[in-house]
Amino acid sequence: MSPEKVRAFPIDRQLFLVREVAAKLCSLHGETATSFWRAKASELLDLVVGSGRDRTAASDEVRRFFLAVQREMSAGTVAETMPVLSA
C-alpha cells in the first residue's frame, strides 16, 4: 500500500491514551490541570500534523480527543480502569 493511502488511527479512539489523560486530569486541579492539558494538546497537535494531516484537520482531531477525555471523566470509569499496585 502506498504511503499516501495510509491513515493514522484517530487519537480520540485510542482508548488507552484517552484513559491515561483522563486519569491524570482527574488528579490535577486549577492551573496545574490547565497547564497539563495545554502541553498535552500541543504535543498531540504536533503528532497529528507530523502524521500528514493539515493543521485544521489536526486541530479538529485534538478537539475530538478532548471531548473523548471529558466523556471518560464524566462516566466515572477513570478510577476503575487504573491498575491497583501493591508493594
Image (cartoon, rainbow, N blue to C red):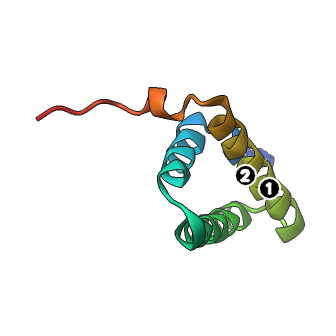
Q: Amino acid at mark 2?
A: Phe
Marks 1 and 2: in contact by CB < 8 Å?
yes
**With 74 as the anchor, is 30 left or right in this view?**
left
Residue 30 picture location, percent across and down: 58, 67
> Which residue position holds label 2?
66
Does residue 45 sit above or below 66 in this rendering? below
Residue 60 picture location, percent across and down: 85, 57
Seen from the viewer's position, the closer of residues 82 and 16 is 82
Residue 71 visible? The answer is yes
Q: Residues within 10 Å of mark 1 (few under 14, many from 20)?
A: some
- Find numbered disc 2 in the image and state the secondary structure of the residue it sits on: helix
- Find numbered disc 1 in the image and state the secondary structure of the residue it sits on: helix
> Which residue position holds label 1?
63
Distance from the alpha carbon under mark 2 to that under mark 1 = 5 Å
Q: Amino acid at mark 1?
A: Arg
- In what quadrant of the picture does the C terminus appear? top left
Q: Which residue in the rendered view is the most extreme toward the front?
A: 30
Residue 29 picture location, percent across and down: 54, 61
Q: Quadrant of residue 63?
A: bottom right
Residue at the (83%, 70%) spot, across then down: 55
Residue at the (49%, 52%) spot, across then down: 24
- In what quadrant of the picture does the N terminus appear? top right
